[in-house]
């Protein structure tokens, strides 16, 4: 009964999302690049939503060398304000009791660049979660925090670029898509896990941002005619990073070892990308003198496509965690995969979308002759979405309804409706 009511509410939300008036002619997206994609996307990464209106935000300021040396500043950002309704499970009081509005993101991005390839990127988010208001409350205070903060130098243009600072780890394709370009309001369950009041909490497999040194670039081989007759470069994109491994916005490394990331993709312009990546991260947890080492490693493979209004992302991610010092501690392997598809019609900016996502956070413990210690905890989510991408305004409306099918250890009645307004500037 509750699920029927929620589906009815979702249908109404789809109608409202499609309601705004649109212009007679679509904007030329080639002349209006998405600033968030420029700030966050690595070479070879495809965008999954139409580019938005982009005002001319370049500002010339005096450099610190000679009078003729000047910085070009690119200023941009976006706001994402949403509404969430989670079905209230009758047997558990912690879930589905905090429906309401949420400030998901309030980004301010600044990029400075000189003609010699030297530059920097600094991005702030005023919608970051900081701490709980009380120990027993799921409500968290918001704060301003850094997302990206790094210096870059591109001595060989797009062939080679060095990054030093805090940036996205070059691993999962879904992570590398700018938040402003996502097909859905939230990333998949395997990436973000289950948060707070949505269900029984479990961490996702996102590698998030890391502090370290990265080399990345793209190498075109040959131009091949695309579906619309234009030549598109066939080539590879690559990224390799050495980082502290303990995540963003921390003062120092937690040990004296480093995490290594590597990503490689075969790309055909902005049409098709076949990619894969791997990482190894020796972590240390606890407080001195009670410190425990835990080695975390993972791999991923993905295919992306963007053709004639159709968008596709399919990927699989695996992450293994082991504690070599404790023999009886099980080795666990998480496995997740998803397929998301969408089509944006060319006239009004209406974009229906669907995502199938699976996540088994503790698929295997690595032992022999024993029962699985973490069975019956897999999650399967079906998300139906409808987006409205305005043509003449920097505006996007999104509606998602997620049907959640959880195995016995995590089973709840907790289907979820999400609405989002995104304003880009």
Image (spheres, rainbow, N blue to C red):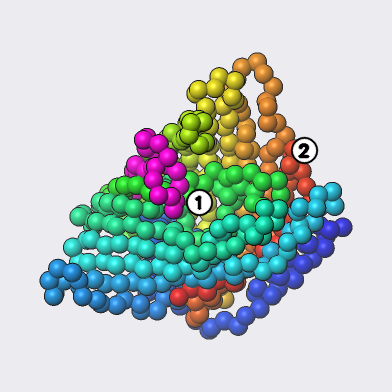
The C terminus, quarter of image: bottom left
Q: Position of residue 392 (x, y in %)?
A: 49, 81
According to the picture, the residue beneath numbered tag 2 turns out to be 408
Residue toward you, 367 or 128: 128
Tell whether 221 sits left or right of 170: left
Check the image and report above or below for 208 versus 185.
Answer: above
Residue at 44% in and 53% down: 249
Please tell me whether mark 2 sits on a helix, a strand or a loop. helix
Indicate the quadrant containing the N terminus: top left, top right, bottom left or bottom right.
Answer: bottom right
How far is the residue under mark 1 from the one under mark 2?
28 Å
Dot 1: what SS?
loop
Which residue occupies the foreground of this view, 341 or 135?
135
Does 253 appear in magenta?
A: yes
Residue 286 image position (x, y, % from top left):
52, 36
List the residue tagged with mark 1: 174
Mark whose residue sits in front, 1 or 2: 2
Magenta part of the protein: which range?
236-259
* Image point (69%, 64%), residue name: 84
In the displayed structure, does residue 283 sit left or right of residue 326? Answer: left
- Foreground: 215 or 396? 215
Assess whether mark 2 and mark 1 are in contact (beta carbons under 8 angstroms). Answer: no
Q: Earlier in the sequence, mark 1 or mark 2?
A: 1
**Residue 230 locus on image (x, y percent):** 35, 63
Report if residue 138 is visible in the image.
no
Residue drawn at the location 52% of the way across and 74% of the way down: 423
Residue 120 lies in quadrant: bottom left
Q: Residues within 10 Å of mark 1 (few under 14, many from 20)?
A: some
The dominant secondary structure in magenta is loop
Picture coordinates of residue 228 (x, y %)? 41, 64
């Amino acid at each position: 009964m509750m699920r029927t009511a929620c589906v009815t509410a979702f249908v109404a939300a789809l109608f409202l999302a499609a309601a705004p008036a649109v212009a007679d002619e679509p904007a030329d997206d080639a002349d209006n690049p998405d600033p968030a994609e420029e700030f966050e996307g690595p070479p070879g990464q495809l965008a999954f939503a139409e580019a938005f209106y982009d005002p001319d935000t370049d500002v010339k300021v005096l450099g610190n060398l000679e009078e003729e040396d000047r910085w070009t500043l690119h200023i941009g950002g976006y706001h994402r304000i949403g509404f969430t309704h989670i079905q209230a499970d009758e047997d558990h009081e912690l879930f589905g009791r905090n429906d309401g509005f949420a400030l998901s993101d309030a980004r301010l991005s600044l990029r400075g660049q000189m003609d010699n390839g030297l530059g920097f990127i600094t991005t702030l988010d005023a919608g970051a979660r900081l701490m709980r208001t009380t120990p027993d409350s799921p409500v968290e205070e918001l704060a301003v925090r850094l997302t990206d903060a790094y210096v870059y130098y591109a001595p060989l243009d797009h062939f080679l670029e060095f990054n030093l600072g805090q940036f996205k780890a070059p691993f999962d394709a879904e992570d590398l898509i700018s938040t402003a370009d996502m097909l859905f309001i939230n990333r998949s369950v395997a990436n973000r896990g289950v948060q707070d009041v949505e269900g029984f909490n479990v961490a996702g497999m996102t590698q998030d941002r890391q502090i370290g040194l990265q080399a990345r670039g793209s190498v075109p081989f040959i131009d091949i005619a695309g579906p619309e007759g234009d030549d598109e470069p066939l080539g590879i994109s690559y990224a390799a990073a050495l980082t502290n491994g303990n995540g963003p916005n921390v003062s120092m490394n937690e040990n004296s070892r480093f995490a290594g990331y590597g990503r490689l993709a075969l790309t055909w312009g902005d049409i098709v990308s076949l990619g894969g990546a791997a990482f190894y991260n020796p972590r240390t947890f606890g407080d001195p003198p009670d410190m425990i080492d835990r080695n975390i490693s993972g791999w991923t493979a993905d295919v992306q496509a963007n053709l004639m209004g159709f968008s596709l992302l399919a990927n699989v991610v695996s992450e293994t965690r082991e504690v070599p010092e404790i023999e009886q501690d099980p080795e666990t392997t998480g496995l997740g995969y998803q397929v998301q598809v969408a089509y944006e019609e060319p006239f009004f900016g209406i974009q229906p979308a669907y995502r199938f996502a699976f996540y088994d956070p503790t698929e295997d413990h690595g032992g022999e002759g024993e029962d699985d210690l973490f069975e019956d905890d897999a999650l399967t989510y079906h998300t139906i979405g409808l987006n409205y991408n305005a043509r003449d305004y920097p505006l996007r409306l999104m509606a998602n309804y997620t049907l959640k099918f959880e195995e016995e250890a995590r089973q709840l009645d907790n289907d979820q409706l999400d609405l989002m307004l995104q304003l880009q500037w």
